[in-house]
Image (cartoon, rainbow, N blue to C red):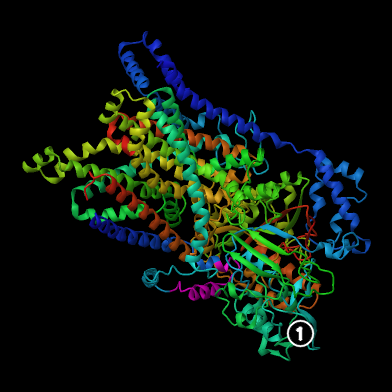
Amino acid sequence: MTGYIVRRVLATLPVLLVVALVVFALIRFAPGDPAAIIAGQEATQEEVEGIRRQLGLDRPLPVQLGIWFRDILRGDLGQSILSKHEVSELIVQRVVPTLSLAVLTEIFALAVAIPIGVLAAWKANSWIDRVVMVFATLGFSIPVFWLGFILIFFFAVKIPLFPAAGYVAPSEDFISYLHRLALPALATGVIIMALIARMTRATVLETLNEDYVRTARSKGLSEKLVLIRHALRNAALPIITVVGLGVAALLSGLVVTESVFGIPGLGRLLLNAIVSRDYPIIQGTILIISVVYVMINLLVDISYAFFDPRVRY
Amino acid sequence: MSRKSRAMSAILVLLGVLLLSLLVACAGTEPAEPQIIEVEKEVIKEVEVIKEVPVETIVTKEVIKEVPVEKIVTKEVIKEVEVQVPVTPKEVPALAQPTPALPAALIAEQDKYGGSLKVVSQASVKSMDPAFAPAYVTTVTSQHVFEQLFAWDANYVAQPQMVDSWKLTNDGKTYEITLRDGLIFHNDNPVTSHDAIASLGRWWEKQAAGKLVFQSMAEGGIQAVDDKTFTMTFQEPFGALLNAASIPHRYPATFTKEAAMLTAFEDVGEENIIGSGPYKLKLWEPGNRIVLERHEQYSPRSEPGSFLAGGSVPYLDEITWVEIPNEETKIAGLETGEWDIVDGAGLDFYDQLSMNPDIRIASYPGHQSTIQIHVGVPPTDNKLVRQAILAAIDAEAFMSSLGPNELWTLCGSVYYCNTPLESQGGADLYNQNNIERARELIKEAGAEGATIKVMNPNDYGTITPLGLVLKPMLEDIGLTVEMPGMDWATLISKIRGDDYNMFTTWWAQWAVADPITDVVVASTAGYAGDYSNPRFQELRLQYAAAQTADERLSIVDEIQEIYLDEVPKIWLGQFSSIFPHRTTVKNLDVPAIPMFLNVWMDN
Amino acid sequence: MAQREEQATPEIAKYSALSLRSATSRLWVLTKRNPTMMGGIAIVLVMAVLSILAPLLNTIDPKEIDPRNRFLSPSMDTWFGSDNVGRDVYSRTIYGTRVSLIVGAAVAVIATFSAAMIGVLSGYYRKVDAVLMRVMDGLMSIPSVLLAMALMALLGGSVQNVIIALCVVEAPRAVRIVRASVLSLREQMFVDAARALGTSPIRILYLHILPNTLAPLIVQATYIGASAVLVEAYLSFLGAGPPPDVPSWGNIMAEGRNYIRRAVWVIFFPGVFLTLTVLGINLAGDGLRDNLDPRLRRRM
């Protein structure tokens, strides 16, 4: 087991190397020169060049890549080109809003998805099942930003139940913090809910067809007990997996939701950095997001191996 | 399970979606008609404000200025206004903005202190170093922290700010400048002439106007006389120092000497954002918010405050700029009182906001929509083609694509209308809207069917529509148009290359106000084919040396005629930016950029 | 709506020709067994018809501007109203069906095809596998919207480039699926047998491996198509899509987002069309999956 874990952890390193290379290559070859952006349209040519030199952007790309790698290995993500703030500091500042939104989103999604997923599986192939599944599919067919705006339109503008946007730190005002995150969590939650509901249905359905459930049923156990004691419990692991894998969808969704609702999270940090081609922030943030993603996948795999002896290491 | 119920499930879902769509559609169309009654209310309120203004401030000035009443006097309600308002709407724009001293008769001075102002930033603030970053938001935030030696008043006239007195020697070559008393940096050190000199150095390291000043100076022309006084000596008589040094954007901010010694090609860093202005930096969460607090040791000038000049009283305890990325959410938060001001709200919120009795709208009309033409790439290297494009321009179509009619004007003057430099030079060539002539010119140039590459940003509310109007117009006069999608960052990075024929943009009067700051006249930008015209450069130097307003205007007339003949850029008209704020924010006017000096909160 | 037509067919079928009758009755059986799939397919078909017949459906040039008539409310003349430069939202939405379906279909086909190539190579030749899979894992661990955005910045905004960017983003997941099924297939008896008989690897790939991976791949293709239609909208929303005169749903919504209260119709209608289309493709995909490869249920 330990050997397996070590091997899996080591296997993530080349993946992260690929991420680092891809990100570096993409943003460096993409048009957009931070020096020209800083200098603005009224700047002189020599001003642009002066800034470029000062930022070290005139050095050959391999050298810049080398510097970046060297810094990463030292645990240094560099500084913002523009404001000179430490990238790691910026990321730490943004983690709380993003994480809060992610957690609230997952809570909301799970609270809705598991009951309706189980219901759909229990009533498989009935009209309840179909309605639930069509709605679940609808959930991840809606563009998040569109849903976000429609929610703002109804619940912040037409009927002002929620603030339209903004973020308050939990330490400042906890109630307001939750109140403000409610709409964005709802908007992103719908997608995640849809994914989890489908997964729950599929796995519960599968376990319901397993022999031991049939046995339990034939013993005369009530449907409720069968559902809870056997089916749901055995379906828990795959559901955990999908929660983990849903993180990819969640991250993409959060980037968009943050920009719709004005939440100062990692997604906003990144989008702002892209607009000004602040290379160190873009590189650092994407790298961190990828590390998180890879780690979650790793945990999912390991927990799988841990819980399910049939997985061979 | 019945067959019906199965099929029903799918039908139900589809019906549900359609129902929802109807609901939203109905809800959406509801507020289409403006309610005139609310507008009346608003008018009465404005009148009350006007009455508070004592007579002596009704100075007639020809100024572009935010005019709250103008927006209310829409065509439908003008009659009601006349019935109720003793002041005719025409007189109102002539009012100077109420100076802080005036309403003191009604509100005790000390009652105006306190309160926290929450502003939605126009964009993400990435740097607060005004000598390094020329971003609008950098200017707006940092202008509260740093001071300039000279600063614009509300009429765009340079006035001393940090300066107590200055004099020009008889030969017109040497300025002697003395700083005023009581200038203290946020780190409690007094401001000395050495700080001022070092800071000017940081300014002319990069900025075009600063460079002109530096190049015109004699060798070692800047000298400290003592801790308060320094001199600047020029090679030739130089009339433009005050103009150049008072520009509010890319301005010569006075840093501490230590910070000013750092290169302007790099940010000074947060720890060096130490000015002597009325507010100091308290907290900066990059990408989220910036909080300034009152600089308690600040002693304002004794004159009444006027824009950046005069006494700037920091009534507010704190000013917070928050970053909200989305236009719609900015407005929703303003309406619910989440924040007090939106800096540069989307122009199409204007109608809706002007109906809201809790919101007042300040506006600033000094933005010029512009098409910048590359003179080094075929077919636009041919002057005839450029003239053809100029001939085809239907300025009204461009400007009306940007927002409601109240917020744009046609203006044929290159250095803006209602300014001291408004010019009539070559005026008949502006807004010709003459497709026939354009086609003839294209034919004459032999450029029929030639491909024009247009750079137009996808993501810029006040620029994107210009490209949408431009493309069919160019096609109409017989050109082929390529207009790929790109973001503003890409566009701005490509303007110094040769892979395009034109791009759409805007210029603001606070940044490019005259031939000194105009990069096309200075031929220094190195873009759009690096258009350079020796006559332009001569005229620019003449302008810098000119001592009277008439001289300056006649130089501008000639510059404008050359512009309209050579067509290195086409100006389409002027649009306003709007600064809607809650009525609890008092004494806010925006002559150029939104400054919260002398602004107070009525809670 | 589509369901109702489906339901009506058996009655009509009784009176029509035998072949038609058998065809419709087969359709009916399918519908009965999987109404949501048929509903999905019906939506997609309706959208396809709209996109083909766009010029005939009372539309005008979707790029035609009229800046003096901005934000007209929906009415009998302008069904879905007009936008910020006076373009007809109805015409743009209907033509937008073309752009979205082309993007969806092209990405589905190209990404799936290239994924099949890469996946088979990777599953069959273990030497390239290690490198290829690390690259795929790397691409997958960057959030798809961000990766697509970066690619668009690199390539420049046009519909073709959206397709290319989305292929890069969507292919890795499909590669994983193909590779997994190749890995299990190459251990199967019939492949061993073929190898023992001296069949060339290419022939084995072509004859045995590819056909057997086809089912999961087709299912995956539909999901990729659905995802592509959505991500195109995200790209436009983030300002990284095709140029703003192109009538894509994403573009229309991206412009409309700033005018929600002024003109909610601009963002609303394309959003409904987009959601319905993606829903349709997803439902069809689910149905295909259930019919073609029940084992895939586990992977959703």
Residue A76 visible in the shown view:
yes
B106 and B20: which one is in front? B106
Q: Residues within 10 Å of mark 1 (few under 14, many from 20)?
A: many
Residue B450 visible in the shown view:
no
Which chain hosts label 1? B
Quarter the C terminus of chain C occupies = top left
B387 and B283: which one is in front? B283
Tell me: residue C246, above or below residue B147: above
User: Residue C163, position in %: x, y?
Assistant: 40, 46
Kind of residue indicated by mark 1: Ile
Question: Does A43 lie within the magenta span?
Answer: yes
Which residue corresponds to the image point at 47% horizontal and 40% vertical from the top-left? A109
User: Residue B226, position in %: x, y?
Assistant: 73, 91
Q: Is residue B292 left or right of residue A94?
A: right
User: Residue B384, position in %: x, y?
Assistant: 59, 59
Q: Which residue in the protein does label 1 denote?
A: B177
State which quadrant residue A242 falls in. Answer: top left
Q: Is residue C114 left or right of residue B540?
A: left
Which residue corresponds to the image point at 36% horizontal and 55% vertical from the top-left? A295
Which residue corresponds to the image point at 71% horizontal and 36% vertical from the top-left? B31
The number of callouts visible is 1
Where disc 1 sits, the SS reads: strand
Tell me: residue A146, above or below residue B23: below
Q: Which residues are magenta?
A: A38-58
Tell me: residue B110, above or below residue B363: below
User: Residue B146, position in %: x, y?
Assistant: 69, 73
Question: Does A126 lie within the magenta span?
Answer: no
